[in-house]
Image (cartoon, rainbow, N blue to C red):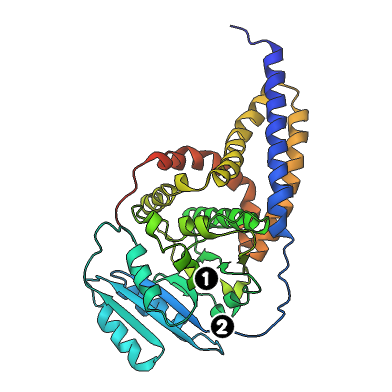
Amino acid sequence: MTIPPETWEILFYVFCGIITFQVFYYLIFFCRLAFYKPKARQENFDHPVSVIVCARDEANNLVKNLPGVLVQQYQSTHEIVVVNDNSLDESKYILDEFKKSFKNLNHLELTQEAKFIIGKKFPLSMGIKSAKYETLLLTDADCVPASELWIQKMQEGYGEGIEIVLGYGAYHKKSGLLNKLIRFETYFTALQYFSFALAGIPYMGVGRNLSYKREVFIRNKGFSSINQIPSGDDDLFINQVATRKNTAIVIDHAAHTLSEPKTSWGEWSRQKFRHYTTSKFYRAKHKFWLGLHSITLFFLYPLLAVSIIFYNWWMPLAVFGVRFFLQAMVYYRTMKKLNEKDLWPWFLFFDLWMFFYYIFFVPAIWRKPRKNWE
């Protein structure tokens, strides 16, 4: 059967429409992060801070990463609360040894599981309950601050009316394709949630580097509305409580945290499947904006290929070029801001990779969540 030329023309116009949507996202959302400059602080008061770390069988990570949290240079009062959640390894003894040298370390030993509350929410709730101070700063046992100014820089995000500060949880830079893909996916997620927050549509944060006021937690009745979901103690909680007026971002390199990336495709796949099971619980407007961007990105390259082969080849390339140069500029500036500039030469490859990424991971949205946390 011969396909009429009008069909290819229609597909080319659909391709043009997709490019229009993509350019819209770059101009309206992503350019906000590309040209973002933090406001100068109006006051230098540093709030007392409770840093909360939840750990389960994380003895090795505590030895490696906890010192980076304990030696922070923060002029105001602060404490480190480690919630040791039913660990079967030597975590308790390691924390006891750290306590001898660091008096601001408090560790809470949990020896029973909470019924009907799955995931990390119960130990995190207990840590928040035991915290002394109103300002909370959260991270994980497998994370280490990028500098000794982590607490200081994250607290600089607070100002009048601000109750939530979103930070960047990066991964260590190592050799290999998998490391680059993991870091790009982390960067791409941050590009979205930082840009949307700057546009007044905050929708998530990452528990590796997140700060909020205890009052926000109390006002929302903790995690009560999402206790039945294994994950979501970070992104779903922020999705519920963040507003255009109470949320700020901090992207200073000294305010980043660093984690060890997965070393096998299987481990990373399981991690991403677990994360994607929570996105279906986002608010409708957030799912719309994120979904529209993903759908248009998914169909972009197939329609580009079809238009080049079966239509006038130079026209789709010219249209694609508009997005290409805009994307190159945004990626360069934002990757530089998030200390991921070494990924920039690969950005076109990563853009193509996202087509296969969506094929593989999007079905996780409809999967039943696992009932444990790692």
**Left or right of residue 374: residue 236:** right
Q: Secondary structure at mark 2?
A: loop
Where residue 228 sits: x, y (%)? 33, 53
Find the distance from the CA under tag 1 to the CA under tag 2. Answer: 12 Å
Figure disc tally? 2
Is residue 370 visible from the viewing direction of this image? Answer: yes
Residue picked out by circle 1: 211
Residue drawn at 25 percent across, 71 percent down: 87
Where residue 207 sits: x, y (%)? 46, 64
Amino acid beneath label 1: Ser
Residue picked out by circle 2: 47
Of labels 1 and 2, earlier in sequence is 2
Check the image and report above or below for 292 versus 186: above
Locate residue 16: give its quadrant: top right
Check the image and report above or below for 61 versus 27: below
Q: Nearest the camera: 3 or 157?
A: 157
Residue drawn at 64 percent across, 62 percent down: 245
Residue 199 badge: none
Q: Nearest the camera: 75 or 315?
A: 75
Locate residue 301: give its quadrant: top right
Where residue 324 sits: x, y (%)? 72, 44
Residue drawn at 49 percent across, 48 percent down: 282
Quadrant for the C terminus in the image: bottom left
Check the image and report above or below for 72 versus 372: below
Q: Residue furthest top?
A: 1
**Left or right of residue 210: residue 38:** right
Is residue 308 visible from the viewing direction of this image? Answer: no
